[in-house]
Image: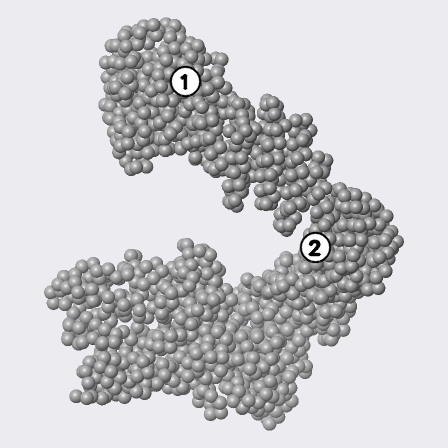
Amino acid sequence: SASAAPASAERARRALADAPAASALSGFGFGGYAGQVSLTARAASDASADAGEVDEDAARALRRCAQKSSTATKAKALRELRDALFVDAADEDSMEEVAKKVKTVAGVLGVSRAWARAYDKLAGDGDAGCRREAAALNGAIAVAAGKGLGKILKSTPIMCAWVRGMCDPNAEVRETAMVAFEKTFSTDARRAGALALAHEVILDDLIEALKRRGPQDMIFKEGSEAEQYARFELSARAALRAVTFTCERLSAFEGDESDAAASKFSYLLDELATLKTQIRGEYMVIRRDAYATLAAICKRAVDDEITPAWRDALRGQVPKIASTSFALISSETEPGAMRDMWELILGIATSHPDAWGAIDVEKTFMSGLRKHFKRGSYGAASVSSPSLLPLLAHLPPKALIERDADGRAMSGLVRVMDAVFAGWCFLSSSAVRSNEARDTLPAMREGVLYGVLKLAPLTDHAEECATHVLVDHVVDVWMREFLARGNGAALDLMCDVLNVLSTKPHAKTAVVEAWAKLGDITEAALDDPEKGEHANAMYARLFASGKFASSSQATAPFAKAVFAQAVDAPSKQTFERLATLVESLGVEPFDGAQRLMDFALADNAPQGSGAVVAAVLKHDASWWSAVLDDANAADELESSSRVRVVTEAIAATKSFGELKCPALDDLVRRCAKRSSDASCSQLLIAISRWQFFEPVSADVASDVFESLASSDLGDGASNARKALREWILIPPKEALSIPWSNAVGALFAHVLLESQHTVKCVIHEAESEGESEDEVEYVETKVGEVQRDWKAFECDAESNPVLSPALQAAFTTAIARTAAATAATQHPGESDLVLRLWAQMTARALRAFHVDDETFAKCIVDEMENNVDDDVTFHWLNAVARVLDWSSLLRAMDADRRKEFTVDALALAPSVNKAFAIALCGDAAMQTQIFVSLVNAVLEASPDDESAEDALLNFSRRARALDEAWIDNHADVVREFLDASSAKLDTCSNRLTRVIPWILPSDMSGGAHAERFIAELTREVIADIENRRRGLDGAKIRLVAACFSRADDLGETIVVHSIQDPACAPLVEVFRAIAKREAAEAAASAAAARFGDAGDSESRDGSSASDVGIAALTAAIIRRTAADFDSRDWGSIIGRLHAWTALRAKMAETYAENEAVDGDDGSQSAHAAATIVCLIDALPMELLEATDSSSGDLVPYAAHGSSMMTIAKALANASWPRERAEIVERLYRCVIITGTELRDVEEEDDDERRHRFWARCRDETRMWIRIADIACGGTPTKTSAWRAGVYVDAWDDAPCESIGALYQLLAMLPTLWFDVSAADDDEVLEALRRAAYGLLSNEALIQAAVVGLDAGIADVAKVEQALDAALAAADENDEADVGNFGTPAESAGLREDLATLLSSAGYEPRVAWLGWALLFRYVLTLPIESSCRERLVNYTRETKAIPSLMRDIMRSMPLPESADVESEDDLPSSWRGVDWDNPASATQIYDPRFSFEVLMYAAALRALPASVRTFVSDMKPQRDAKRLEGATSATVSPTLIAAEFKAVSAMTFAGDGTGSLTVKPSIATREVLTTYEIDESSLELTVRLPNAYPLAPAELVCAKRVGISEARLRKWMLGISAILKHQNGAVAQALLQWQRNIDAEFAGVEPCPICYAVIHPVDHQKPRLRCRQCSNTFHATCLYTWFRTSSKSSCPLCVTPWGSSYR
């Protein structure tokens, strides 16, 4: 027997060896062999071939394949075996390609036995990839074996494994094994023959596999529980599939072996009890495969192609299979297996009808079937329900139609259907399973129809069967429940069943009774509102279907009951039910139309009565006139219910022909005048829903439009708006286009006005200046009532077809007119944002109605001329142009209008017409035309009219921005313009000075445009200069400078374009002519003075104008050709600079003394002087500042050649460094003295003086900007700042000292004392603040700006020394009074002005940040051991101000998008290019490229790393902290780490002789190796700085220790870790402090009980203050902090009042 069979390999060999000779197959072969020898004979003749040699590599690989090793090892072993047997086989090679590369056939045959055993194991491996590779290699070996394959098959178990591989659950494995099989055996006959020959071993192997009940029965039990189950599942599933495979392949193969296989197959099924183990097993996936296997066997049993032996064998098993399978209906409960189960059952029932005889149908099957459906098919209703009808059709009819014990007909079917209904009830009770319940309904319908149509006629009591099914069960039970649950689909389905069966003779009586029963049920349901609604809905659907002829027995009683209910309890619901029934059944069931109309038109009839009227009108239209007459007779339409009834009737009527009449026209007119009333509005809405308002005449429709357009449509008029929206929604006939469009415009006007209260404007600032513009976003804060209606109108319009041309034209005109008229109500220039919003809304409205942009533009332009004032014209069109574009609007104008409009528009401010100018300049054809027009306008304008000039400048500015060389194509125009201007230079010099830089080419000679003009101008100016009888004409000198200037020289930009330009020689000629004249005048003045005749002097105003001209000329020369100046020229310039700055400095003192200044105060000259200083600073050279002991020097950059050397030499000869220091000092003096004046103004609190002061500052804005450029520039001004500060400190009349004056400017609060509405105010305020910060942060003043209390600049160092000495003395004095220690600012020696600023009280956050920037900048200049540094750091700690500062900074700091930052390129632009060594410098603070927040963060991180690190570690959200850390590691950290190592290298670690500390920094590894040695002990520590240092704290590692205990090591490690993590010093300072602590500890000093350190981490003092009671000593700083935070003056340990003793 199979149970006693040996192992599979031995069994295969024995079976093949004992095979009879009769099994030989003529013409059967393997691989490429097609001989005439049987496999048995071949095996005998090739016995000697078994002696083939086995390659060592192959043997090794085979052993590894058979081992219980990992999947990777097996896969590797398979590849090694392939490489041992085949030459150069690759993974991508096909099976045939591998086989062709066989080394030797003998080698393949030599490993055949071992391979068969290995493959037998590998076919059951848990890894699909391993099985696939094994199948592929098996195919290659089989193909390569050729003629030797027969012996392999007979003597090894390879075919068993091969079959399992072809039946593997994995598709890839299965396909690979199948391909191998087909390649090896080339025809179906050969394949079947091979299987037949080995059928014995194959089937025995399957029996053995399928007898295993679980993983516990497997031979190999290694691995986890999951792995064991996976192997079992693989084995069982492959075996089940193999049973099917074997049956299908062998059953059609004729021969003795096939017949024997049939017998063996029958034995297999008997042995396995028709797979009962698998079918009843606990594993669903195996059960499914078993179902499929049995279904395939049963299906194969009736196949005509199988052999007789197989037919007998399989059909003999069918009853057994049926007995097992039909029982599944009771046992299978898994939804996933239901489909396979039903396929098995239905397969047997369909192909083997006699199989039912193998079981007791009622006991074995029907009870299980009912249970199955009663339980809702166990969650598989979608599978079981469709299976019911075919099952009923193939069940024995007797089981369904027999009477039960009580004599009830067709009990079998009824019980089954009741079970299905019970299952539906079960499923529909859960919302989650509602889909399954829905799937069950078709089964109920089909079951009923099958029973009545097919089964009932088989009995002799068909009518009784139909009645029992339909009345007693379908209606009385099922439909009653359906109605209670409100399941319309189920009700409709059963109604359809009754309709279908109503035509069948044997069922007619039953259907009539069923409808009557249903009528009783639905009539009773009216008592329950919910059930009544369900019943009414059912009848409504029934009527809508048109299949209600047979249901009169139900509908008539229900209709009367509904009418009675409506009379007794009138409501909208009952009226709607009644209307539905009247419409479907007519008026007869209700005793005629009169009764219904009297009822519907009764006073105070509820809503819905109109629907009853409409239903009656459908059957008798004559009642409509009476209804309308009744409504028109009402005096007050608003209170009349008749209007509502008419409205409901119109809404319910489907044909307008039934409605149209004069009486309705009259009623609609009256309602249109009262549209604010809800009932009138509803009537109008009902009319509007008919296309073209068909129920009323065209005249009435026009009147309605006019009435609605003239009514109030604002807030509170929702009824009128709703009516209007509905009337305008559907486009009318073209005859109504005008009134319709007027109504649309009326509503749109209200929409525009309402938007001012419902839309908020959000302005997003542009990322960069220049041509970019702030982005404006409109955010709807709430939806207004009018806007809500309009939006609905727009949405509906977008889905409607395009309007007819006439309607579209009327609509477009109405919208454009309305928008233009509404825009005219706004104030020009102040409502641009509102106009832009309205333009967007206008465009959206027109586009919703598919109006193209060209039509849009044309209408806007036309209506603009008619409805908009000239003052508003441009602003409205500019707003529209942002939606369309200017080109479209200009094209819509005629030529004359376009020209006039263009000149007027360009004359507006550049900020207003920016978009317009860009549009003009972007059109090449229009550009020339506009340019010519503007030039002519300038020539024609009067001297005091600057509008044409402004227009030309705006146009030129925009044209240049778009194309630098735009003017090159307009040489003729420019030349003609200049020629025409030459004749009137005396009156238009200033105008030309403004215009010329914009309209000349880049060529400094002027080229074809202006070469002649420049030459003539230069000659004329030089001639005027040489004529000493005339004063210098400053305007013409400026004009000469303008001829050699271009657009980028204008404004406040400091640019040096070239060192030497020969084309600019005329500038130098003019300059030297002026110098020559001034020298002659000076000589003449000196001679006159010598002889006592002072002569006439020019007025100061005339001199000022000439100074401005000379300054412009000088600036132009320095920008273009500074190398042409010699030392005398520079000396002349320096002399003027001295004169100009001296005058302004003197006037500054006069202003500060509150004295009036007559004439020129020198501000223009001072601005010119500062500009020239900035230009000289911009030359490519480095200035070494002059000091009291040095005259300074100039170092030119070699890259600029000898010309730059010439400039530097000439400037040096003119003593520029020393002279510059004096000039800049006077400019700085002006800033400081202005600060003192401001202090005086605020103290006096004189509003008149305050406004005079600010008006003057505003006029001097350009001067302050230029001085601020010097103060914040890169050229050193230390000497100048020091001298200016000391000068003001020594000035007796100064209201305050210098530093206080600068803080006064820095911390100005403009909102308290002047109007900041003008942009100029912001500009001058920023300039003064920038100049003040530049001076305060200057190296010469930074100490006085931060510390020194309130001392003058020269005394700050002395105050600091005194403060240090006093603190040291207090620390030394045990008896010092610690009760009065002052504020943190006083303890730190902080300047009072700075302390006030740092408190942020009353200041803008960014102003307070400037104070912090000064503090951080000064801290970074102090050495590590500085006591001042420690005091300032302690100030930040005690005030706890850093977290608040960092929170303010982080609110607006730009961060990278992610924490993954590799370089600056991954960061926002404001992080790039920063000098992280000096982040708080004035140069960077006021550089627009950088973020103030980023610079402040970097400064804080450098000055106070521990404080910032603590803040960031607690920062929320942590995602921002990670992003900040990523940005820091890529930018600030490398600089900080380099600074740390530099400080460590420069530090001298000299202790008190107790021990020695050696420090070795390594910047490559970012590590500092420290070694502390004392006596025989030593300790090596490594301090490692991470990438994100100092945000990430330094890491401390003990590298080596000798003679140091574990406890002491832990204490020291904790100590230095705390210093590194929590102190704001550098690594070098931490190491030095640690050394001192250890030295002091070894010297016997006890640590402070508060901080547990010997040396204080801030002031580096030892504990000196001793408690008189407990004798413990404390650090003075620790004790002061304890007193301050605890608000007590007692000892922290014994709590004795400090200084007292009770001993």
Q: Quadrant of residue 937?
A: bottom right
Q: Which residue is at 66% across, 26% downward?
A: 506
- In the rendered image, the vertical position of residue 910 relative to residue 649, given as above or below: below
Q: Position of residue 268 (x, y in %)?
A: 35, 19
Residue located farthest toward the left when viewing the structure as drawn: 1576
Quadrant the C terminus occupies? bottom left
Q: Quadrant of residue 397?
A: top right
Tell me how far mark 1 sits from mark 2, CA to CA: 72 Å
Horizontal side of residue 158 vs 1197, given as left or right: left
Which of these two is toward me, 473 or 1537? 473
Residue 1513 visible somewhere in the drawing: yes
Residue 73 visible somewhere in the drawing: no
- Specify the amino acid type for callout 1: Gln
Horizontal side of residue 30 vs 1048, given as left or right: left
Q: Which disc number belongs to residue 241?
A: none
Q: Which disc number belongs to residue 317?
A: 1
Q: Secondary structure at mark 2?
A: loop
Q: Which residue is at 57% across, 64% downward?
A: 765
- Specify the amino acid type for callout 2: Ala
- The number of discs equals 2
Q: Position of residue 633 (x, y in %)?
A: 86, 60
Q: Which residue is at 67% across, 37% downward?
A: 515
Closer to us: mark 1 or mark 2? 2
Q: Quadrant of residue 1?
A: top left
Q: Which residue is tagged 2?
A: 569
- In the rendered image, the vertical position of residue 395 relative to residue 1487, given as above or below: above
- In the rendered image, the vertical position of residue 743 relative to residue 1379, given as above or below: above
Q: Position of residue 930 (x, y in %)?
A: 74, 60
